[in-house]
Structures are given as C-alpha cells and as structure tokens.
Image (cartoon, rainbow, N blue to C red):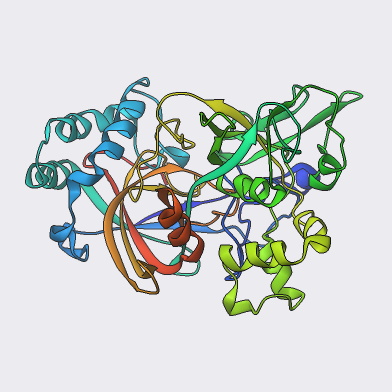
Amino acid sequence: MVFFSASLLPRVLAPLAVSALLLLSACGDIGTRGPATGTTEPSLPDQVVLKPAKFSDLADWSQDDLLAAKPALTRSCDRLTGQDDTRPVGPNGQGGKVADWRVGCTAIAQASTTPALKQALESHFQPFEVSGRDGRQGLFTGYYEAELRGARRAGGVFQTPLYRRPEDLISVDLVDWRADWRGQRIAGRVVEGRLRPYADRKAIEAGSLRGRGLELVWVDDPIDAFFLQIQGSGRVILPDGQVMRVGFASQNGQAYVPIGRVLADRGAIPRDEVSMQSIRAWLSANPKEAAEVMNTNPSFVFFRELSGDGPLGAQGVALTPGRSLAIDPSFMPLGAPVWLELEDVPGEGSKTGPVRRLVVAQDTGGAIRGPVRGDLFWGYGDVAADRAGRMKAKGRYFLLLPRGAAPVG
C-alpha cells in the first residue's frame, strides 16, 4: 500500500496560499476549470492511499467498450512520452517516470480492437484502488462544453464581455519552490514589489478591467458567461453563423465559492434540489438579485480563442466526451488511465444508472479537490449539458500505472 500526503503551506504564507482541499458541499455547483486558488488553509492535510488490485477487482472490466477510450489514451500517451525519460509523472513521482510509460503506450497505440486493447492494458499496467482520509468513496460531478451567442464587437444585446488574460496577472506554481507544493498555485499582481491579490469578480464586473482592450468577445447573457467560467470552455455562435471556440486561459487567484451552496444557505433553493438547472432557473427568475449572488463567487476566469480540436484539458490535449476526467493533480497524475465505478449517473430523461468505464485523467477543476473526486466531461450540446448539470454521483476509482514503475511515497 502506497501513501502520498498533500503538505500544508507554512502559516507565514497563508495569505497567499492555495487550499490543499477546496471543499465542495453536496449542493455545490460544478468546479471551474483551471487551478484552485484561495486563502483558506485546511486544518488537516489529506492523503491518497494506493492499494494494489487485480483487473478482476474492477467491476464489469470485461464489459466496457475499451476502444472508445483509445482516443483519450493515445492523446495522453503522446503528451507524456513527448517528454524527457527522467521526468517524474504525477505528484511526487506517483506515476513513476516518463520512461516507465513508453512500452505500455506503444502497446496501446498498436491495439486496434477492444480485446487487443484489453490485453495491452492488462499486460503493461497495474490497477491501484484509490482512497483518502474519508475512504474510497467520493463525489463525482459532470461538465460540458457550453454554447453561447456573441459578437466580436459590443452592440445591441451583446454587452457582456469575456476577457483575455490581463498582462499584469502573475500566476505562480509553487512546486517551483518546493516539491511538496505540487498542484498548488497562487495568482495576483505586483504592487510596489509585492504580490497582491488580483481584482475579484465584483470589481471586474464593476469595470476594473475596462479600457484595457482585454475583451475577447461579447455575449448576450451574463448568466451564460458565468456558467461558461464554471465549465471552462465553450463555443460562441457569432451573428454570421461562424463558431468561435474559447477555452480557459487563466484565473484571478481568488477562491472558488459554489453559488449553489450560497442559494441553499439562503433558503432560495432546497438543498437536495440544487443542480445547474435549478441554479440557472433561479438566476433567470430573479434578475435583480442575480448579479449579487454571482458576485459571491470571487473567482473569475479569463479565456483565449482556440483553434483545432478541443476543448483542451489541463494536460493540454483535446478532451473526449465520456472518457475524459478532471481530477485533483495534487493527488492524481494527469494523463493516467482511470477505471471509474459510479452509481446513479444521469441518463436520458429521468433515468439514472451505474457507470463502469475506462477514462483518462486529462483535466483539473477549481472545486475538484481531494484524492477521490472527479468531474466527468460529457461533450457538447443539450444532452451533454443536461447530464452534466444533474450529475452528483457517489463512486470510486482505480488508478492504472505502468507495471515496473516505482512510485515514490
């Protein structure tokens, strides 16, 4: 059994520290893409425990259409194996070194049928059951690629800007200072030689960035813009019918606050009825209060225009609907295959059911914190939005690492 611990930052750095666990209550909304930052220091560090398992321990392993996961597997393999052999994979070298992945990735690339891919995975990878301080069960939500209507110039109904990353926004990856701070980041701006917090959502919405030429595109609905920041990527339909794809560029460094929790605490939405759909409906029905509620989440996301395949995850590869998973990179290695076992996942209409499938850890999220926590990407369109918005499933997962890799505890 292998243990990995997420170390706390020293208290002297607490005003600038990211939280090792940005807790999401059961009524919280989906986590914003990109790194989680904030000023809340947890009382205790969490840890991930990896317990060696057999493929026969994976429920319905032989029933999954593994070939459907091959695009995700090969994209992540290409990304991993394009690096130096000695580079550690995952937090504290949890996934061994890049060299450990080459044989398995080659076998995956050569597999052209589900049985062949199954054989490649079983021959070259070892499953580990993942658990944390709260055990092996965790919360799994969903996200999707949003659709908005917009224009490259303000005018008419297009009055809500999506902003590019400001040039004075400084993002700091703390692993550059200490290895045990991997996955933790801060962001801000330099004032008189010191890093200070960047403007929060309320200040930005009030106009703190106006006049700087940072507007990427203008959309027709501030609620759509807010939810785009939660999803992290989307397609903006322009007046001439052209599609502009936008993706996460950076975040202002402020802590992510789920407004679903805010609305439940205020009694606006029953706690057990909070979902993306119910939050959106409440905001639309209460326009005078909507801006104030959205501003209770100080986190603000900046975008960039994308070209080619997408949307892109935190690993820098295009996501695959139903096969890409956002994880906490403080505990799990980006690019690794993951066997997912979930209960009560939304299906068509009001149906729910279990999900047993191979996915790949290719993305992160501001509210995706902890050893057993995930956000499943559902793709683009109304069906994807519906499933993602209603998903709040309990489950567990197994991490697949190359046989022969030597994780460092």
Which residue occupies 77% across, 66% down? 286
Which residue occupies 55% across, 36% down? 237
The answer to whether residue 195 is left or right of residue 247 is: right
Residue that protrudes farthest toward the right in the picture: 192
Q: Give how far across and how far down residue 249 sits, in percent.
A: 61, 31
**In this view, 236 is above or below 65:** above
Q: Give how far across and how far down residue 320 sits, in percent.
A: 35, 42
Q: Give how far across and how far down residue 368 sits, in percent.
A: 54, 54
Of residue 405 and residue 384, the one placed in the foreground of this image is 384
Q: Give how far across and how far down residue 62 sits, in percent.
A: 13, 59
Assign the N terminus to one quadrant of the image.
Answer: bottom left
Of residue 53 and residue 147, the one placed in the foreground of this image is 147
Find residue 50 and report its image quarter: bottom left
* Figure disc tally: 0
**In this view, 374 is above or below 120:** below
**In this view, 155 is above or below 409:** above
